[in-house]
Amino acid sequence: VDRLIGKGELPDQRRRVESTLLEWMSLWRDLVHQGYGAELVSRNPDFAPAVGRRASQLTAGERQSTFRSLAASLQAVEANANLRLTLEVLLLDLPRVGAAPIEEGKQAAAEAS
């Protein structure tokens, strides 16, 4: 949570958290669609293989619930909720499924360079 919030003034911290939540929502959007086998263009093509693997490890309910939790957390942050508390609740709600797609995507991008 400390790394997500970062240092600086509260408005900067709030913007940083909002940006992170939007990125996570984008990944989870792809994960939800992949889980249903939807033929949509991924918003995160670098992470598509990892997202596909994770989608198969989660139930439809877990995928949807996580996306809703992310959206609710973003809405809470935008409504000036306590950042630390909002993120702690969110992180407790996230399902556990091995390495995060973002880490695998970073690794794949580094290998391609």
Image (tube, rainbow, N blue to C red):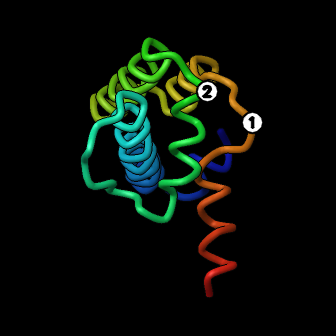
Quadrant for residue 63, please give it.
top left
Identify the residue at horizontal 54%, vertical 53% (top origin): 49
The answer to whether marks 1 and 2 mark residues whose Cβ atoms lie closer than 8 Å is yes
Identify the residue at horizontal 59%, vertical 41% (top origin): 53
Vertical comparison of 4 with 34: above or below:
below
Residue indicated by mark 1: 98
User: Given the current orientation, which residue lies at the most extreme bottom position?
Assistant: 113
Where does the image place residue 78, in percent across and percent down from the top left?
29, 35
Q: What residue type is labelled 1?
A: Gly
Which one is earlier in the sequence, the residue at label 1 or at label 2? Answer: 2
Left or right: residue 22 versus residue 57 is: left
Where does the image place residue 59, in percent across and percent down from the top left?
51, 16
Identify the residue at horizontal 43%, vertical 37% (top origin): 31
Q: What residue type is labelled 2?
A: Gln
Vertical comparison of 61 with 20: above or below:
above
Q: Residue 57 carries which label?
A: 2
Of 9 and 38, the residue lying toward us: 38
Q: Residue 66 carries which label?
A: none
Q: How far, Cα to Cα, is label 1 from label 2?
A: 10 Å
Vertical comparison of 50 with 89: above or below:
below
Vertical comparison of 105 with 88: above or below:
below
User: Given the current orientation, which residue lies at the most extreme top position?
Assistant: 61
Number of the front mark, 1 or 2: 2
Quadrant for residue 41, please give it.
bottom left
Circle 2 SS class? helix
Where does the image place residue 40, in percent across and percent down from the top left?
25, 47
**Label 1 neighbour load within 10 Å: few <14, some 14-19, many 20+:** few
Circle 1 SS class? loop
Q: In which quarter of the image is the C terminus?
A: bottom right
